[in-house]
Amino acid sequence: MALTKWWRKVTLREREAGHAPGEPLLEVLRVSMHYNGVVALEEISFTVEPGERIAVVGPNGAGKSTLLKIIAGVLTPTAGSVRIYGHGPQGHLCIAYIPQRNQVDWNFPLTVAYVVLMGGVGMMGLLRHPSARDWEAVRQALERVDMLDLADRPIRALSGGQQQRMFIARALAQEAELLLMDEPFTGLDLPAQEGILELLEGLRRQGVTVLVATHDLEQAAAYFDRVLLLNRRLVAFGIPEQVFTPEALRTAYGGHLRLVQIGDELIVVGDTCCEGG
Ligand code: ADP
């Protein structure tokens, strides 16, 4: 058997082995995280079903990034556990994690196509030469995010929106079932944000589950099925109408958020989510 076929077989078998029948896509069980005495997360528990779009919201320092990194298997929690289809997240091929853009070394000498390719071939696959099938998957993924013409562009020459779309293409090539995105809209203009939201809508139709950390409450309410409101503890988790109550928002944001009740509507008029207010 050709070496390339053997690697591919191992990769697919691993994916199947990582899915226990009847288990939820994602189960976070009493997860706590302490960094040198700083409590970032305390006893967080929730489950997510396939195809849901979840917004993770909360003030600066609420633990949003930490939660995403723990689900991705990048960080190990101090206590508690994360289960993806009943198994730990480490090395799970079906998870794609997109960090905040400022955490990526954009000067790394890679082209768009290679970044997408690395999602498709997985860690073990890096030991072999990419096949024509791998490159075809890259082409299709780039086409889906409308970036085929930028395949050979160095990643340092991309706009913020293109950077995010490239990572979504990478998740598509990886055939990810759970996509974790940390503040993907920050610093993007409105058309670029709308482009990403449209792609997320397409992923939902495909059954891909998406968890997005965002500080934009309006966007969370308008575009996501459920909202997880966090401030070290889980303040509320449910459909936006259930989560965005004056009580829950005050618990999460304290005095940093000004809420105005006009008739039946709750209007958020101030949010000091970002440094400097
Ligand atoms: P958010 O994404 O909601 O802004 P973070 O998860 O980045 O929150 O941070 C939660 C808390 O953990 C903050 O108090 C932050 O200062 C702290 N923290 C995050 N990363 C580290 C780290 N690597 N070392 C020490 N403290 C950290």
Image: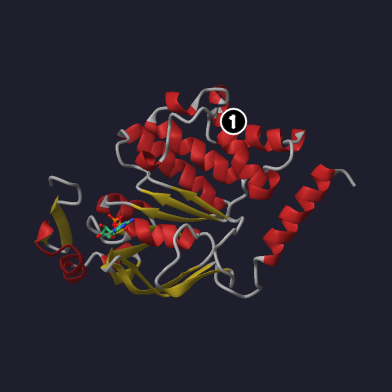
- Seen from the viewer's position, the closer of residues 264 and 124 is 124
Mark 1 residue element: helix
Q: Is residue 271 visible?
A: yes
Residue 35, image quadrant = bottom left
Q: Is residue 173 visible?
A: no
Q: How dense is the environment of label 1, judged by Cα within 10 Å: few (below 14), some, or many (20 and up)?
A: many
Q: Tally the marks.
A: 1
Rendering coords of residue 112 (x, y %): 54, 30
Q: In this view, does 183 lie to the left or right of 198?
A: left
Rendering coords of residue 245 (x, y %): 21, 68
Residue that appears at 59% across and 32% down: 114
Rendering coords of residue 55 (x, y %): 36, 57
**Residue farthest along the right direction in this orientation:** 1
Residue that label 1 marks: 113
State whether residue 5 is above or below residue 84. above
**Residue farthest along the front direction in this orientation:** 36
Residue that appears at 56% across and 46% down: 171
> Looking at numbered disc 1 in the image, what kind of residue is underneath it?
Ala
Callout 1: CB less than 8 Å from ligand 1? no
Rendering coords of residue 219 (x, y %): 31, 50
State whether residue 177 is above or below residue 83. above
Residue that appears at 46% across and 62% down: 71
Residue 56, image quadrant = bottom left
- Seen from the viewer's position, the closer of residues 36 and 119 is 36
- Seen from the viewer's position, the closer of residues 16 and 195 is 16
